[in-house]
Image (tube, grey):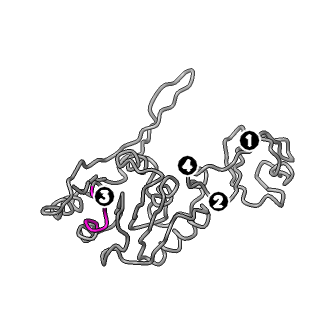
Amino acid sequence: MVNMSKKNYKILIESNTGKKYLVKDFSEDYHTSFGIISSKDIKSKKTKIKSSTGKHFLLLDAAFPDLWEQFQRGPQIMLQKDIGLIMAKTGINKDSEVVDAGGGSGSLCLSLANICKKVAVYEINPEHHKVVQKNITLSGFTNVTLKHDDIYQGIKENGLDLITLDLPEPWQVIKHAEKALKDGGHMVIYLPNLTQMQKFLTSLKGSSFKVLETVELLERKWVINEQIMRPEFQMLGHTGFMTFCRKM
């Protein structure tokens, strides 16, 4: 995680329940429902500490997934199962420069910023813009540029490795994306229904983009213990369709 937050946060995990607490200020005692954690313990190098009520906690440096869980939610966020597939399929890395449009709550753009060189975020909705800004501030990332711009009107960045579009009308961005992406760069479209996706794919005809695949990723957790091995009764089903394209 080459672009981890410049801010030093700690994560407290209660041993029995696994409940997490994000500690931002080490100068004062931290109050939990399981008792008070002294500032002295928080500032120490110990990883195992006790609260004032004798409850056991694990004290760790906060990693990006710990921050992700604390992000303010506004619009529907992109979930980790879909974000992970985007990272794996596009091969982005510490040298990659990315544009994300439709920032939403910042889940995708900040996950990308955690491993990429630069991320520019286009978010035209003023309420969503505020939420993304709060989550950027929480993360402490300095490689994210948040823009209150309409990507339908153009993309100012160029030589990009990846463009991600979580927008109602991504077909309006195709010509802008062709100019902004480097040869071989990827574009990923995220849409909730197939009617929109079909219109986008039709709009690609005559462009320099090759469609690699359209994917819907489902996630099912399992319960495994000494007596039981079964899938959870509820699974994380449809969240969105992703189409992966590459500039050829």
Q: The disc labelled 4 sits on which kind of residue? A: Met
Q: Nearer the viewer, residue 202 or 91?
A: 91
Q: What residue is pinned by disc 1?
A: 58
Q: The disc labelled 1 sits on which kind of residue? A: Leu
Give the percent coordinates (x, y) of residue 184. 28, 54
Q: What residue is pinned by disc 2?
A: 6
2 and 4 marks in contact (CB < 8 Å) = no
> What range of the chain is rendered magenta?
177-183
- Residue 26: within the magenta? no
Spatial CA distance of label 2 from label 1 is: 22 Å
Residue 170 lies in quadrant: bottom left
Q: The disc labelled 2 sits on which kind of residue? A: Lys
Query: Residue 187's mark?
Result: 3
- Residue 179: within the magenta? yes
**Mark nearer the viewer, 2 or 1:** 2
Give the percent coordinates (x, y) of residue 207. 17, 63
Q: Which residue is located at x 21 percent, y 55 percent?
A: 248
Q: Dot 2: what SS?
A: loop
Query: Residue 125's mark?
Result: none
2 and 3 marks in contact (CB < 8 Å) = no
Q: Which residue is located at x 29 percent, y 47 percent?
A: 215
Q: What residue is pinned by disc 4?
A: 1
